[in-house]
Image: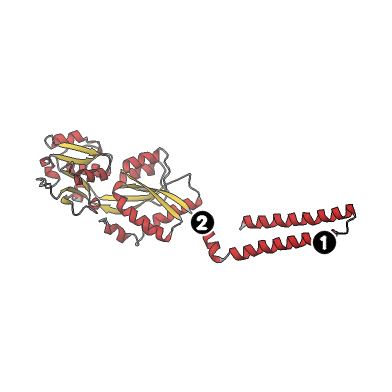
Amino acid sequence: MKNRTAGFKVKIAAALTAVLLAGMTGAACGSTGDTEDSSAAQNSMSKEEDTDTGGIAENDTGEDIQREEEKAGETEIQVFIAASLQNVMTKLAENYNSRHPEVKITYHADSSGTLLIQMLEGYECDVFFSAAQKQMDQLEAEGLTVDGTRTDAVRNRVIVIARKDSNTKVTGLSDLGKAESIALAGGSVPVGRYTRQALVNMGVLRETGDAAEITASEISKAFGGVEISEQDNVSKVLLAVAEGSCEAGTVYCTDLYGYEDELEILETVDYELTGEVIYPVSQVVNPLADEVQTKAAEEFLAYILSDEAKPVFEEYYYDTE
């Protein structure tokens, strides 16, 4: 709209200049055609005015203005999510975009520990959805969470899994040593820390100030030397078992989504052993974001926490209560 108005003014100025020049030329040369030249210039100006104003009236309908406003509101937000959230986040983003196509949601899925490091290193992020409180605590301590936006969104459970055709003798955490090989997430990965904490509470592993510090070799030794394949996020643990490279492993209940025909749950680990598996979410301080991007992040976070999103989480086996 502003560009078209500017063009209109330029055309008027050009036409008026032509009128003045024509008059001056006629006076200087004593021409009898000055009236015709002036009339031609005025007619030309009139046509340009008619054409230009006609274009404005024709093009700027209510729908055009709405499209311009939507285009002006287009933005992209960066959402960092724990790897176990990838399936449900794909669905949530799809649902949200059906009503807000102007917002592009780019999400990065990895272990919460890896994502925390990236944010502390300065990676651009608008929303962080963690699989544990520890990483969110650290982010908040650094002053990188937006005040008042941190919320405990959903809960999960740690499970012990194996392929349905594995004929494993493992029944759960207590006898993991019966497996030929075990896939476990590292201690910096929430599910890896929860698994270690459960083994500590069962008396299988030593007491420690932070269960995340217990190494894979210590776990192997506690189970009589069983082979441990340590992975850097929960999705890789799942694939190691699903593909048969490891006999058993620990993941979240929600990771079983889509693998129900291939994998079986050997044990659902009680909260008394792991502690509650809570997923906190928060808007993140992003100094690179403009007002539109910041507002979009705020609104997408509100959608994640809304009653409308709860059935989606539950479809993917999350506890929303």
Quarter of the image for the N terminus: give it: bottom right
User: In the rendered image, is residue 221 in sight?
Assistant: yes
Q: Amino acid at mark 1?
A: Glu
Q: Position of residue 320 (x, y in %)?
A: 29, 58
Q: Position of residue 307 (x, y in %)?
A: 34, 62
Query: How dense is the environment of label 1, judged by Cα within 10 Å: few (below 14), some, or many (20 and up)?
Result: few
Q: Is residue 116 above or below residue 102?
A: above
Question: Residue at the spot x=48%, y=47% of the render?
Answer: 289
Q: Secondary structure at mark 1?
A: helix
Query: Splitting the image into 4 quarters, where does residue 61 fall?
Result: bottom right
Q: Is residue 33 above or below residue 86?
A: below
Indicate which disc residue 47 carries: none
Question: Residue at the spot x=42%, y=39% of the render?
Answer: 122
Identify the residue position indicated by label 1 in the image: 36
105 and 292: which one is in front? Answer: 105
| Label 1 close to label 2 by CB (< 8 Å) | no
Q: CA distance from mark 1 to mark 2?
A: 47 Å
252 and 105: which one is in front? Answer: 105
Query: Splitting the image into 4 quarters, where does residue 16 fall?
Result: bottom right
Q: Position of residue 293 (x, y in %)?
A: 47, 51
Indicate which disc residue 71 carries: 2
Question: Residue at the spot x=71%, y=63% of the render?
Answer: 47
Q: Amino acid at mark 2?
A: Lys
183 and 206: which one is in front? Answer: 183
Q: Secondary structure at mark 2?
A: helix
Q: Is residue 111 above or below residue 20?
A: above
Q: Is residue 33 left or right of residue 311?
A: right
Query: Splitting the image into 4 quarters, where does residue 309 fall?
Result: bottom left
Q: Position of residue 181 (x, y in %)?
A: 15, 39
Q: Nearer the viewer, mark 1 or mark 2?
A: 1
Mark positioned earlier in the residue sequence (1 or 2): 1
Quarter of the image for the C terminus: give it: bottom left
